[in-house]
Amino acid sequence: MSQHQIAAYQHIHQQQQQQLQQQLQSFWANQYEDIDQVTDFKNHSLPLARIKKIMKADEDVRMISAEAPVIFARACEMFILELTLRSWNHTEENKRRTLQKNDIAAAITRTDIFDFLVDIVPREDLKDEVLSTVPRGVGGAGAPPSEGVPYYYMGQPQQGVPVGGQGMYVGKPVVDPDLYGQQARPYMGQQMWPQQPPPPTDS
């Protein structure tokens, strides 16, 4: 690759990173807003009985309050939505319109918080994803990937219209980025969540 091609690629990579960061912030902001506005806790996208059964699979769990499966259902919905958003980025990068297993593998390998899922993704999918992020003709750690640069594009939803499951919106992070554990991988270029200044101390 020529220096001009590398510079152009790095510029595109930076723009795509910024787009993904904005989409994730918007996703979590809307999730937070949606949670604040919930008044009906009886409607769920996931079956509470199944969630309760999974919770009881732990031998140490004897009793489960009625609201615990509701919170788990909501957390699972949010988890699925974020993983889908990140997976869809990979789908679009490859100019496809169908989300595939390798797109999910890509989202998992690119995001530290999803490391716990590495064992459930077939090894060949992980290997293919890692190889697809190594640029052709450019070596060295920290080099930009040749493909698979995360970005997210979604048409602007109308105000108040849910995205994804019923009542799901795209928004900003609810949790502190440091607690969330989001760290950039060597090929990611930058951290997904903006750094927040530390809270003032009483001195």
Image (spheres, rainbow, N blue to C red):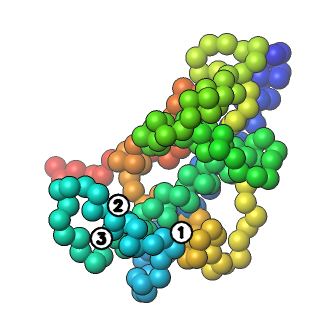
Instruction: Identify the residue at image location x=74%, y=27%.
Output: 146
The answer to the question of whether label 3 and label 2 lie on touching residues, with beta carbons closer than 8 A, is no
Tell me which numbered mark, 3 or 2, is placed earlier along the sequence: 2
Label 1 vs 3, first from the N-terminus: 1
Q: Is residue 100 above or below residue 68?
A: above
The span from disc 3 to disc 2 (Cα, nearest Å) is 12 Å
At horizontal 60% and vertical 54% (from top left) the residue drawn is 84
Instruction: Say which quarter of the image contains residue 155.
Output: bottom right
Q: Around disc 1, counting alpha carbons within 10 Å, would you say few (fewer than 14), some (14 to 19), or many (20 or more)?
A: many
Image spot of residue 96 (x, y percent): 80, 47
Q: Could you say where residue 75 lies in the image, as x and y percent from the top left? A: 42, 63
The alpha-carbon separation of the residues under discs 2 and 1 comes to 28 Å
Task: Mark 2 or mark 1: name the one nearer the start of the chain.
Answer: 1
Q: Residues within 10 Å of mark 3 (few under 14, many from 20)?
A: few
Q: Nearer the viewer, mark 2 or mark 1?
A: 2
Does the CB distance between marks 2 and 1 fall below 8 Å? no
| Residue in front for this viewpoint, 91 or 161 | 91
Residue type indicated by callout 3: Ala
| Residue 130 in view | no
The residue identified by callout 2 is: 54
Q: Nearer the viewer, residue 66 or 165?
A: 66
Amino acid type of the residue tagged 1 in the rendering? Asn
Q: Dividing the image into 4 quarters, which one contains the N terminus?
A: top right
The picture places residue 20, in percent across and down from the top left corner, at 63, 48
Would residue 175 be visible to someone looking at this image? yes
- Judging by the rendered image, the residue that carries numbered circle 1 is 30
Residue 68 tag number: 3
Q: Residue at x 40, y 82 (%)?
A: 41
- The local secondary structure at tag 3 comes to helix
Of marks 3 and 2, the one in the foreground: 2
Residue 25, quarter of picture: bottom right
Amino acid at circle 2: Ile
